């Protein structure tokens, strides 16, 4: 799987080189299985990163600490 090509596909992400956080507003959380997921930061399927939940929880703690 070429995640770089998927994340820069204009048919999936209009203007993929632009930083647009609003494109993720109102979207449900992606499941751990990767079905229906457009963002493949942690991989997908059987090869998904085992540290995904740890990384997401740490990001939540750091951002909430900053706020």
Image: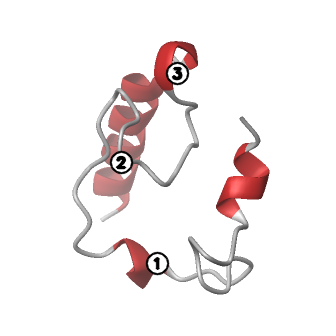
Horizontal arrangement in the rendering, residue 20 relative to residue 6 (left or right): left
- Badge 3, how many Cα within 10 Å: few under 14, some, many 20+? some
In the picture, the disc for residue 58 is none
In the image, residue 6 above or below residue 61: below
- Badge 1, how many Cα within 10 Å: few under 14, some, many 20+? few
Horizontal arrangement in the rendering, residue 65 relative to residue 49 (left or right): left
Horizontal arrangement in the rendering, residue 15 relative to residue 43 (left or right): right
- Badge 2, how many Cα within 10 Å: few under 14, some, many 20+? few
Give the spatial CA distance, label 2 vs label 3: 14 Å
- Answer whether labels 2 and 3 touch (C-beta < 8 Å): no
For discs 2 and 3, the disc positioned in front in the rendered view = 2
Q: Which residue is denoted by mark 1 in the rendering?
A: 21
Q: Position of residue 4 (x, y in %)?
A: 77, 52
Residue 62 appearing in the image: yes
Identify the residue shown where x is 33% and y is 34%: 57
Q: Earlier in the sequence, mark 2 or mark 3?
A: 2
Q: Which residue is denoted by mark 2 in the rendering?
A: 36
> Residue 16 versus residue 65: which sits nearer the camera?
16
In the picture, the disc for residue 48 is 3
Identify the residue shown where x is 62% and y is 80%: 19
Image quadrant holding the C terminus, namely bottom left
Image quadrant holding the N terminus, namely top right
Q: Position of residue 29 (x, y in %)?
A: 26, 50
In the image, residue 40 above or below residue 48: below
> Dot 3: what SS?
loop
Q: Earlier in the sequence, mark 1 or mark 2?
A: 1
Residue situated furthest front in the rendering: 11
Identify the residue shown where x is 46% and y is 78%: 21
Give the spatial CA distance, label 1 vs label 2: 19 Å
Identify the residue shown where x is 74% and y is 79%: 17
Report which quarter residue 30 is drawn in.
Answer: top left
Q: Position of residue 16 (x, y in %)?
A: 68, 77
């Amino acid at each position: 799987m070429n995640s770089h090509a998927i994340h820069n596909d204009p048919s999936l992400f209009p203007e993929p080189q632009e930083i647009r956080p609003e494109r993720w507003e109102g979207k449900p959380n992606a499941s751990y299985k990767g079905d229906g997921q457009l963002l493949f930061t942690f991989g997908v399927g059987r090869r998904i990163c085992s540290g995904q939940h740890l990384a997401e929880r740490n990001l939540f703690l750091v951002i909430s600490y900053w706020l």
